[in-house]
Image (spheres, grey):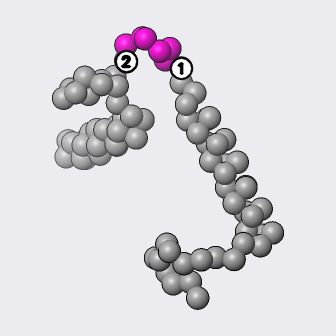
């Protein structure tokens, strides 16, 4: 029997599991190809960089920063009664 969280258990492969594994591998390779596409050419400087490391920042970091700015701006606008 397979127990949750254990990686050492042996699983008997059947046709359905093999097809699911192949589909997963294909979707992962499609995702990796989509993520490597970028509009900034290699060798060009990053438009937005980290203040600490001077490296280009990740999209998720940019989204987090914009979310914080939006939240702060909304809170200040509410205090000043601006809509």
Q: Secondary structure at mark 2?
A: loop
**Compared to 68, does 11 lie above or below?**
below
Quadrant (top left/top right/bottom left/bottom right) for the N terminus: bottom right
Task: Residue lying at the far right in this picture: please name it.
Answer: 15
In the rendered structure, the answer to whether residue 25 lies left or right of residue 79 reads right
The residue that appears at 40% across and 41% down in the rendered structure is 60
- Majority secondary structure of the magenta segment? loop
The residue that appears at 77% across and 73% down in the rendered structure is 14
What is the C-alpha distance between the residues marked 1 and 2?
A: 11 Å
Residue 56 magenta-highlighted: no
Region in magenta: 39-46
- Which residue is nearer to you in this view: 78 or 63? 63
Do we see residue 83 in this rendering? no
Q: Which mark is residue 68?
A: none
Pointer 1 or 2: first along the chain = 1
Q: How many marks?
A: 2
Q: Position of residue 81 (x, y in %)?
A: 24, 44
- Which residue is nearer to you in this view: 24 or 2? 2
Q: Which residue is mark 2?
A: 47
The residue that appears at 55% across and 35% down in the rendered structure is 35
Sort mark 2 into few (<14), some (14-19) or many (20+) by Cα contacts within 10 Å.
few
Q: Which mark is residue 39?
A: 1
**Compared to 31, does 16 lie above or below?**
below
């Amino acid at each position: 029997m397979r127990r949750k969280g254990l990686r050492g258990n042996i699983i008997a492969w059947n046709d359905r599991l093999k097809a699911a594994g192949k589909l997963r591998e294909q979707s992962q390779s499609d995702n990796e190809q989509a993520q490597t596409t970028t509009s900034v050419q290699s060798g060009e400087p990053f438009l937005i960089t980290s203040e600490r490391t001077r490296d280009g920042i990740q999209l998720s970091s940019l989204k987090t920063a914009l979310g914080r700015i939006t939240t702060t701006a909304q809170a200040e606008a509410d205090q000043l009664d601006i809509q």
